[in-house]
Amino acid sequence: MSRESASSPASPETCAYSLRIGVTGHRNLSDAAGVAEAVARLLEQIEHTLRAQSRTPLDRVVVSPLAKGADRIVAEEVLKREGTSLEVLSPFPLDEYRRDFAEPDDLAEFERLLSRADLVRCVTTSPPPQNASDDEQSDWRNRGYLRVGRAVVDACEILIAVWDGKQARGMGGTADVIEYALRQRRTVIWVNASAPSSEPQLIPDWQPGGRPDADGVPTTAKALSPGYYQLDAYNRDASIGSEALDRAITSEQTSLQAHARNAGLPAESIRHVTDVLIAHFVRADRLAVHYRNNYVRATSGLFVLSALAVTVVVGQVLFFPNLLWIILLEILAMGTAVILWMWCRRSAWHEKWIHDRYLAERLRMAIFSLMLDQEDATPTSPPSQALPFYGGPQDWLLSTVRSIVETARAIPHKPAGFEATRQFVVEAWLDDQRRYHARNADRTHRAAHRGHRAGTVLFLVTLVMAVLHFLGVGHGEHGHAETGVSRLDVWITFLAIVLPTWGAAIHAIITQLELERIAARSEQMARLLDLVVERAREARSLDALREVVAEGQRVMGTENHEWWILLSFRQPVLPT
């Protein structure tokens, strides 16, 4: 039964995690059977660690060049498990690579595993050198082996290294690949090729030329696979109640269906979107709003409580010097700030906010890209101008978006006409996002302006208090019996000290929430999207519309990526 006719929309299905396992290791093993047993035990240990108390399905991808020895052993052992796919990375074009396997049995084993591959990719673009010396040929091949080893590292999350612990005996050897993997911060698990019966070890660090440091394999999902841990936390997140989520999904579906009717699109044309993507988008969007609100309240609360603590202690010293119990209120305010900070960090509100918002915005783009049957409906690579040392979204977010989109793409749907599709994409997405950014720019500008105005008022009042204090206003106008509360000069001193504290708190909140920068970015986004909307309305063919939509994706994708970078540096901090 479709959601249009259902009494209640179905909640989104649990997202599966794609665990990508790479392999590096020796071709010639003295105890291949022992290595196979060690790898099997290791895989069981990994699965037990990840599946403990989780509800997230686990898909496996093994990435291997399928060279003799370790490459094939690890690939074979992973492929024995249900829900596993194989990606083969070749150091050379396949015909050239097959020359590595001179023995018929060796080549036959390679072909058998190659036939099971879901993806085969060659990492070398240059042809083998012609009329080259043996040394030049050898150098070209060694560079290919190093290149494919690094490509395996880049394509995996966990690298299983079947290694004897010795230095590489040539360019592209196992030790070279391990060193690269550690630089890329991959999880490297060492299966000792010389003593496979020994327990596998995690290699956290290694200085070439010495023996690697080694620890036991992590026994928690958070340490072994942070991506799996985070996706499982997302899948288990019940912060939005099922009834509230169902109402939000129904509302979003109704809105999208209304846009479709206005554009003249039949309901069957958006079925793949309403049946899959909407539920996932709404859940991610609502969770992002929930955690953003928590983060904003916590961040603002930290600075307010700190200013309140200063206010209390200054008031106690000036007005009630004999009532030491009032200091307990200062301690209470500061203690509450510490508890709030720890709660915010422990609950990962900031991290969950930017994760969920990124997921929601990528799914929003995919909803309308799929309407045009675009092959690349989920552009997930960072913008070309992004510097590599700025951390972007984690791999689990990117693979989750791709998985959801491919599920939606597989649902049969009725193609729509060009005019109706164009109107739907423009009105329900491009122009809607333009209007959102215009409203957000205005709203955030006004919030920043209110904060600056309050800060200015506090500064001016403080200046007046300083001038009055300098002029001696209130000094000598009180009797000995007067208390601090009734003395004008004490009040002037109190305000001169306390008001700057509150002004600093307001400024810190504005800075921490990046109000001015976000307002400027939304203002610029509204202008850029205005041009995209204009071009989309002028499109006269499906291909032209696809080009405009791709441009819209690039604009919004870049903004989404830069927003991630901007906010990732705004972890909640205790005021100092």
Image (tube, rainbow, N blue to C red):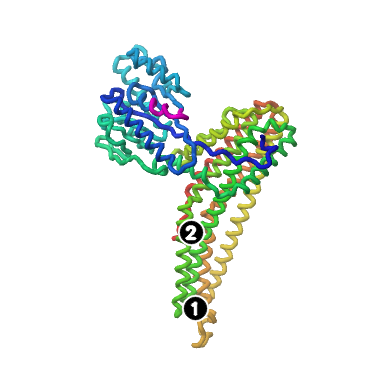
Highlighted magenta segment, given as a residue range: 75-84
| Whether residue 11 can be seen here | yes
Q: Is residue 134 above or below residue 358?
A: above
Residue at 51% x, 54% y: name it.
512
The residue that label 1 is drawn on is 319
Specify the quadrant that holds the C terminus.
Answer: bottom left
Label 2: state its secondary structure. Answer: helix
Q: Nearer the viewer, residue 518 or 312?
A: 312
Q: Residues within 10 Å of mark 1 (few under 14, many from 20)?
A: some
The residue that label 2 is drawn on is 340
Specify the quadrant that holds the N terminus.
Answer: top right
Q: Is residue 289 above or below residue 9?
A: below
Q: Nearer the viewer, residue 385 or 54?
A: 54
Mark closest to the chain's N terminus, 2 or 1: 1
Residue at 31% x, 36% y: name it.
200
Label 1: state its secondary structure. Answer: helix
Q: Amino acid at mark 1?
A: Phe
Residue at 56% x, 62% y: name it.
455
Where is residue 57? Give x, y as percent.
49, 36
Q: Is residue 414 above or below residue 207?
A: above
Magenta-drawn stretch contains 78: yes
Q: Based on the displayed image, in which of its 4 quarters is residue 401 positioned?
A: top right
Left or right, residue 171 beside residue 78: left
